[in-house]
Image (cartoon, rainbow, N blue to C red):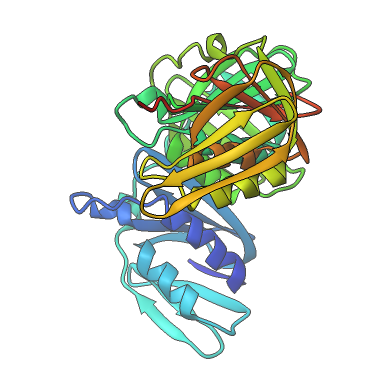
Amino acid sequence: MEFACRMTQLEHALSIAERFTGKAATLPMLGNVCLVAGPHTLAIVATNLEHAVELRISGTGHKEGMVAVPSKILFSTIQALKGAETVTLKEKNMGIAIATDRWHTQIHGVNAEDFPLIPSVAVKERFHMTTGMLKQGLDTVLPAVALSEFKPVLAGVYVRVSPHELRLVATDSFRLAEWKHTHKENNSQFSFLLPHRIAQELARILPAGEEEIEIGVGENQARIGWGENSVITRLIEGQFPDYEAIIPNDFNTTGYIQRDALMNAVRVASLFASRLQDVTLQLQKDTLKISAKNEDVGAHEMILPFSARGGEVTLTFNYRYLLDGLAILDEPEIFLGTNSEHAPVVLRNKSNDRTTYILTPLRLS
């Protein structure tokens, strides 16, 4: 094989592929990336047997073929080749020769025929949207994903497609984030659990634009494809909890507050939080008081204007979880609703319920 392309395109694609390679010493082949050259595109393929990625970049193919080389070494080398606009990759003795106008490097490879085949997904359900919208939805719910594998069904993003609506949901049992998107595909009705790692990678690599993306779901796998790029992943098996049952429809106390002012107040209060990372919000008739106290540091409180309806209530939160929820809302003014000091609190944008964040208060003795 021999292929010439822009250096920036190759570096970007390899930076993505590197994160999909396998790191296990018992399967060294998975630490390689497979390059497949065609007349006008170079396919870059990586897998760890759980997930796989195939990316294509444009260029000039002088000779078709494929080669498999260590991903980390190739990526690090390309990163170091500063100043060159184009690079030529040429298969040589089961390895690859890299050439620019000033650099000449050779990396030993392995037999590309031994590189694992990327499985094809027997797609049963399909769904289309834009890359920008999927990226936005994943960014919204990812902070609430459980980082522990103790409950596997919580270690990912729940995707539910129904007529006219897509929902992404994540929860770690302490907080829950839901994102809704209206669509036109009125015959779709299915759901699946996307692993946390793949959801993170998609949020990182998807372009924030109007490019169409197709999500195809099979028995235990999914294929996410946009342009000439695709990600294939195994899905999490199991039943996601009936999360809608915990979302209250009515509240004893509600109100609206400026999002940025509340975020700033919580950040300052967090400097005085105890080891429990707790800050307290007192919802009163005309004000919201944010406070924190640490015996070793001191105490702090701040009062913000707050127009409350219903009874007064005092709530204590993990300030990190509270800031995560405020960060995913994107309107200047937000809604806050609760029923008691121990009941879940609902945060939403003022004008719509596209994003919902539910946070359980701390129970302090």
99 horizontally vs 178: left or right: left
Q: Position of residue 150 (x, y in %)?
A: 29, 27
Q: Nearer the viewer, residue 254 or 73?
A: 254
Q: Position of residue 20 (x, y in %)?
A: 41, 50
Please say if 355 is above or below 37.
above
Please say if 284 is above or below 320.
above
Q: Looking at the image, can residue 228 be seen? A: no
Q: Position of residue 222 (x, y in %)?
A: 50, 29
Q: Nearer the viewer, residue 274 or 263?
A: 274
Q: Position of residue 254 (x, y in %)?
A: 70, 20
Q: Looking at the image, can residue 106 be seen? A: yes
Name the residue at the bottom extreme: 102
Name the residue at the right extreme: 351
Name the residue at the left extreme: 26
Residue at 44% across / 59% down in the picture? Answer: 66
296 horizontally vs 210: left or right: left
288 horizontally vs 80: left or right: right
